[in-house]
Image (cartoon, rainbow, N blue to C red):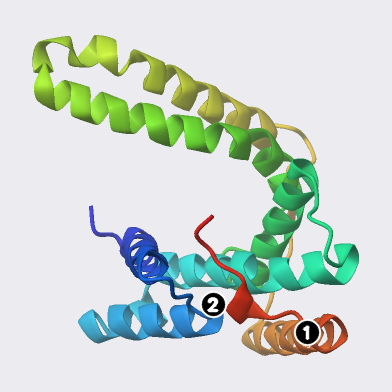
Amino acid sequence: GLSPSMTRAGLVSALALWAWYYGRRFHPVTLLAFAGAITVLVNPSYEWGNLGWQLSFAAFAGVMIVAPLAHAYFFGNDKPHFIAQVLFETVAAQIATLPIILFSFGQLSNVAPLANLLIVPFVPLAMLLVFVAGIGAYIVPQFASIIAWPAQTVLDIMIAVVNWCAHVSWAQTTLKLEWWGVMLWYGVLALLCWYMWRVTKYRFQTSSIVE
């Protein structure tokens, strides 16, 4: 359904693909602001009253702004290998969303980077199999359960990994952050991003989120 996070993902993907088709590129900050403005225009309560919307945009900012700057700062022009890239993007997304999580839930996940490293490689395969299952079930609904079996198996494995990570004794830590801590966190993060950008001269305009 059109949940705030799914709306954001669909809108960002559509805009990025549209720009890519015409040989253009969105600056991540512009894309983030534009998608945020459209979704808030449709439903103003998203900005202050919907945690899913806030976490979705924070994670997007982490992956599309913080992670590339960190890549450029630590690796320069060398492209990091897959594990390093996943780890950087996972940590960047967690850093960007952590203030909201600590403010709202008061819980810090200690296994999030590990869980993402184990899960992310399966995501493209899961998306492909789910797409195939959806098309197959539409064409031959009497065989829907058989066609969906591969997708269900991969999804079950992903869920099992998440459950295993969640049940380890050190999976989470109780830590509450007040509103002023959230503001301070994002202020420091913005300064760090500015510093990495100044040092690396990273050009978002020459990068593309569609590869």
Which element carries disc 1, helix, strand or loop? helix
Residue 75 percent coordinates (x, y): 87, 62
- Name the image quarter holding residue 193: bottom right
Q: Is residue 14 left or right of residue 125?
A: left
Q: Residues within 10 Å of mark 1 (few under 14, many from 20)?
A: many
Q: Are marks 2 and 1 in contact (CB under 8 Å)?
A: no
Which residue is the extreme one toward the front?
Answer: 23
Q: Say which residue label 2 marks.
A: 28
Question: Residue at coordinates 62% horizontally, 64% vertically from top-left?
Answer: 63
Depth check: give the residue in front, 159 or 174. 159
Q: Looking at the figure, which quarter contains the C terminus?
A: bottom right
Residue 60 percent coordinates (x, y): 54, 67
Depth check: give the residue in front, 124 or 110. 124
Q: Residue 140's mark?
A: none
Depth check: give the residue in front, 166 or 139. 139
Residue 18 percent coordinates (x, y): 33, 67
- Report, in whole angstroms, how far the alpha carbon at label 2 lies from the one at label 1: 14 Å
Question: Residue at coordinates 64% horizontally, 74% vertically from top-left?
Answer: 65
Q: Is residue 25 left or right of residue 128?
A: right
Tag count: 2
Residue 146 percent coordinates (x, y): 26, 9
| Marks 2 and 1, the one that precedes in the sequence | 2
Q: Residue 197's mark?
A: 1
Q: Is residue 86 left or right of residue 119?
A: right
Q: Is residue 133 visible?
A: yes
What is the three-letter code of the residue carrying label 1? Trp
